[in-house]
Each structure stands twice: as structure tokens, then as C-alpha cells.
Amino acid sequence: MTMALELLDWHDGDLLAAPVLNALNALIAAGTPESRILGVTLNSDEESDTDLWCPRYGVPFASTGNVVVVHTHKTRKAPPDFAAAFVTADTRADLNGVVKHTLEVSKVSFAPIDAAVEATGMESGGMSPIGLPAQWPLLVDQHILSVPKLYIGSGIRPSKLVVDGAIFADIPGVRFVSGLGRPRAEL
């Protein structure tokens, strides 16, 4: 049995991590149409994992996004830098192919969870591509721009932010990459 999702108002910030709320307000102040922010949904903490959440609420994986926070290394011995890749949940980010090539680095690995949480001010399992530190490279799969109702992390586990994928065209510094996400079956 699927559960119904209710779109709630996002403005008070109760269901968003502070960096996400601040980024949304900054986007609006910079001229992003507020209509690109559709709302926020509530779910239990246990249901925040995409593989549980999508079937529970009847939302296609192709309408749900996942952000992967990574460490990149310019050389094998260089200290790590943060970056992020954002793809729809019916795919997996191609870290060692597309991400590595696009960022022109020698190594890409998942960032340690505690380091990602500390650096973003967001919860593990609720990370959002909106509100990440501005100096981080953010790679976004090109086709996300055409997803009209996209469920993404809100920065906290018990909710999802719902946006029009076109909002990513308004986020400073985003690099759109065709084929960033590879179908799950190929990986």
C-alpha cells in the first residue's frame, strides 16, 4: 500500500536544514521564480532512504534525486577536496568515469559521512544539492532540468524538498553533465 504525500509550505524552515532554507531564500532574492520551489513533504526518519521512500509513497525513482558527496584528489597524494554529484535515483553517479574526468582529478571517493555532515550542516541520509558550500563543484545530470516535480533531500532526514528541476539552472556554479548518472543495471 502506498502512502499519500502532502506538499507543505517550506517558508518557515521547520522541515529544512538551515543551509537549504538560506539557499532557497537567496535564490528567490536573486530572481529565481518562487514557483520552482513546490514545497516540502514529511516522512518518518526510517523512510528517508530513497529505496524505501519511493515505493512507500509511489514516487518513481526518476522523479527523485540523490546527491553524492565525494572527496577528490588532484594527485594521488594531494589532500582531498569536496565535490558533489546530483543524479536521479534511477541512476548512480559515475564517480570513477564521468565525475573523475569532468573534474580532471586523479581520484574520486565517497567522502566520509562525518566529514560531509560537518562540512554541509546537513544530516546523513538527507543531503540536499541545494545549500551545499558555494566553493564545492556541483555536477548535475543534464536531464534533471526537465524533471517538473523532483523530490530531493531537504538537509534533514524526515522530509523531502520538492522542486522543479529547472531550478538548478539558477544555482550559481552548477556544472551540467550529460550522462552523469548511469542506469542502475549498468553499474
Image (cartoon, helix red, strand yellow):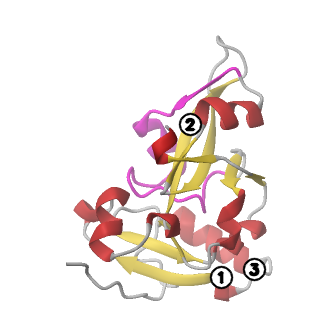
Mark 2 crowdedness (10 Å alpha carbons): few <14, some 14-19, many ≥20 = many
Cβ atoms at labels 2 and 1 below 8 Å apart: no
Cβ atoms at labels 3 and 1 below 8 Å apart: yes
Label 3's element?
loop
Residue 42, picture quadrant: bottom left
Which residue is at 65% across, 77% downward? 25
Q: Is residue 156 left or right of residue 133?
A: left
Provide residue 163's location: percent of width, then percent of height.
58, 76
- Of residues 95 and 28, the one nearer the viewer is 95
Label 1's element?
helix
Name of the residue lying farthest toward the top = 77
Q: How far apart are the two marked residues, 2 and 1, measured between alpha carbons? A: 27 Å
N-terminal-most mark, 2 or 3: 3
The kind of residue on which mark 2 rests is Val
Q: How far apart are the two marked residues, 2 and 3, measured between alpha carbons? A: 28 Å
| Label drawn at residue 70 | 2
| Label drawn at residue 36 | 1
Question: Which image quarter holds the N terminus?
Answer: bottom left
The range drawn in magenta is 106-133
Residue under circle 3?
Answer: 32
Name of the residue lying farthest toward the front = 185
The kind of residue on which mark 3 rests is Thr
- Of residues 161 and 79, the one nearer the viewer is 161
Membership of 130 in magenta stretch: yes
